[in-house]
Image: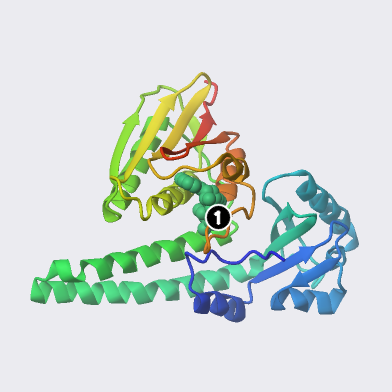
Amino acid sequence: MITIIYRDSLLSVSEKYQFEEQLSLEMRFCIEPDGRIIECNKKGQLLVDQFGPNFLRFFTEQIAGEAKVYLNTIIESNDIVSALLTDKLSDRDLGILYNGFFKDGKIILVGYRTQMMSRLAGEFVHELRNPLTIIKGFMQLCDHTKEYDKFQPIILSEVERMYTILENFLTMSLRKNVYRSMNPDELCKKLVSFLSSECAVHKVAFDYDISYSENVCKVDLDKIKQVLINLLRNALEALEGHLHEKKIMFRGSVEDKGYRFSLIDNGPGVETDVLKNMGQPLYTTKSKGTGIGLSLCKKIIADHRGTFCVSSVVGKGTTVSFFLPFISP
Ligand SMILES: Nc1ncnc2c1ncn2[C@@H]1O[C@H](COP(=O)(O)OP(=O)(O)OP(=O)(O)O)[C@@H](O)[C@H]1O
Ligand SMILES: [Mg+2]
């Protein structure tokens, strides 16, 4: 039985529990293609208790058709499919976002209630206050003691924690894509500054090579950053325990009708059977992985009308790249 949970790497167990219990935000279901619910979490159980053990019965007559189409789309797709559906808990539009995918003949669904989002925003602000207070305290301590080296790792780890909290919020929020036209090498420069500082923190050598282009692509900068965060995290994880010099390279290259962004690591690489599964929702080889990273990246790139590509040589490393089309002038 597979369920989607918050990424282990981002939230500790107690935090997961806290999110689920306090915010009561996330519903999880494992269902048969006809909508029958096989398993769900506590929050999901509330809907089951009220409407019975079939997912399609959570919806008003008008929307039941839409929900059915949504389930079919999930079955036909290899990717994460999202739908904003309205349940019949009230006549007001509650708007529930379901992300779903198909695995082993079953549909795995995660729902977030939009109504909760404003409450969630408040909780996140509160969550961010703790690391900020710690950072402030240590900065003041540094000022007194001049022992910056001693406190720097704690400050950095708190900053990282803030990033992950924010990243989670962005992923969970229903923010629509905000596209703007952007020159790809301008975009690369923004990505490089983020990548180089992350690599420095992890003591990984970083290099880049960016080709100039006069054309523009339509991008949602935050989403593309999220893709890069996931690719970088994978590369860093692949390099963990690596004995040779760890290297990550970022390349931006002009192609026929668009621009290719590649992240290359000199990690252990992957065998063909792993390679062909990479990017399938829930596919992971890591004990603490959830296998969502690459599939989310693929979805974001598909939303940009781009394509995603992975190549790898065992013993040499892995290249993950995505292609974004130019906007025709
Ligand atoms: N740069 C890489 N080098 C080697 N293997 C990789 C690399 N990137 C991804 N993989 C493989 O692809 C799998 C799927 O990656 P994905 O990011 O989707 O999930 P994950 O990293 O396991 O978990 P998470 O959901 O936390 O990201 C990984 O478990 C790993 O086996
Ligand atoms: Mg990953």
Q: Residue at x 17, y 75 (%)?
A: 140
Work out whether 175 lies above or below 42.
above
Relative image position of residue 31 (x, y in whole percent): 80, 63
Q: Residue at x 88, y 53 (%)?
A: 65
Would residue 293 be seen by someone viewing this image from the given angle? no
Q: Residue at x 72, y 66 (%)?
A: 1
On the image, numbered disc 1 is attached to which residue? Answer: 285
Q: Quadrant of residue 106?
A: bottom right
Relative image position of residue 272 (x, y in whole percent): 58, 39
Relative image position of residue 205 (x, y in whole percent): 27, 44
Q: Quadrant of residue 127?
A: bottom left
Q: Residue at x 28, y 64 (%)?
A: 156
Q: Nearer the viewer, residue 167 or 121?
A: 167
Would residue 152 be seen by someone viewing this image from the given angle? yes
Helix, strand, or loop for circle 1? loop
Q: Nearer the viewer, residue 114 or 140?
A: 140
Pointer 1 residue Cβ closer than 8 Å to ligand 1 = yes
| Residue type at tag 1 | Thr
Q: Nearer the viewer, residue 1 or 118?
A: 1
In this picture, residue 52 sits left or right of residue 87 = right
For the image shown, how many numbered marks are present on the structure? Answer: 1
In this picture, residue 1 sits left or right of residue 261 = right
In this picture, residue 109 sits left or right of residue 249 = right
Work out whether 193 lies above or below 153.
above
Relative image position of residue 267 (x, y in whole percent): 40, 44
Please say which color scheme the image uses: rainbow
Q: Quadrant of residue 157?
A: bottom left
Work out whether 93 lies above or below 206.
below
Classify 10 Å Cα crowding around label 1: few (below 14), some (14-19), many (20 and above): few
- In the displayed orientation, state which residue is furthest to the right: 61
Q: Nearer the viewer, residue 142 or 116?
A: 142
